[in-house]
């Protein structure tokens, strides 16, 4: 039995168009806009808004995107 090839593009588009992801993205955009108005970040400055819960921190995009997820660390029960 041969498995059909996965359509990753379709999966990605379906996930990004879900209601929960639209709501999450809108929240991230809203938070960034408020920090732009406050003068903390600017368009094209290479900074990301690192957020966990109510804590908001500005950090370099390369550092923020390089943080290992707990699910990928050794000993994680989540797979």
Image: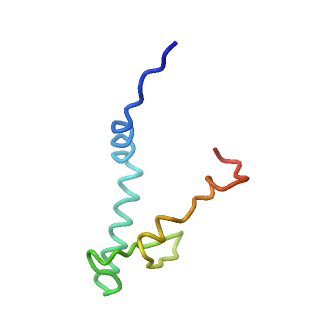
- Residue ranking furthest to the left: 43
Q: Is residue 24 above or below residue 40?
A: above
Classify residue 75 as left or right of residue 55. right
Classify residue 23 as left or right of residue 63. left
- Residue ranking furthest to the top: 1
Looking at the picture, how far across and down is residue 25, in whole percent?
36, 59
Looking at the picture, how far across and down is residue 43, in whole percent?
26, 76
Q: Is residue 25 above or below residue 78?
A: below
Q: How is the image coloured?
A: rainbow
Q: Nearer the viewer, residue 33 or 2?
A: 2
**Quarter of image, res 9:** top left
| Residue at left offset 37%, top offset 73% | 31
Q: Nearer the viewer, residue 53 or 11?
A: 11
Looking at the picture, how far across and down is residue 26, in whole percent?
34, 62
State which quarter of the image contains the C terminus. top right
| Residue at left offset 43%, top offset 21% | 4
| Residue at left offset 41%, top offset 30% | 6
| Residue at left offset 45%, top offset 77% | 59
Number of marks present in the image shown: 0
- Residue ranking furthest to the bottom: 39
Looking at the picture, how far across and down is residue 55, in whole percent?
52, 76
């Amino acid at each position: 039995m041969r498995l059909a090839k996965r359509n990753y593009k379709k999966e990605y588009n379906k996930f990004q168009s879900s209601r929960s992801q639209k709501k999450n993205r809108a929240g991230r955009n809203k938070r960034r806009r408020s920090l732009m108005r406050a003068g903390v970040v600017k368009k094209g400055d290479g900074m990301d808004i690192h957020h966990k819960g109510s804590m908001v921190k500005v950090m370099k995009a390369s550092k923020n995107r390089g943080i290992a997820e707990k699910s990928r660390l050794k000993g994680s029960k989540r797979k």
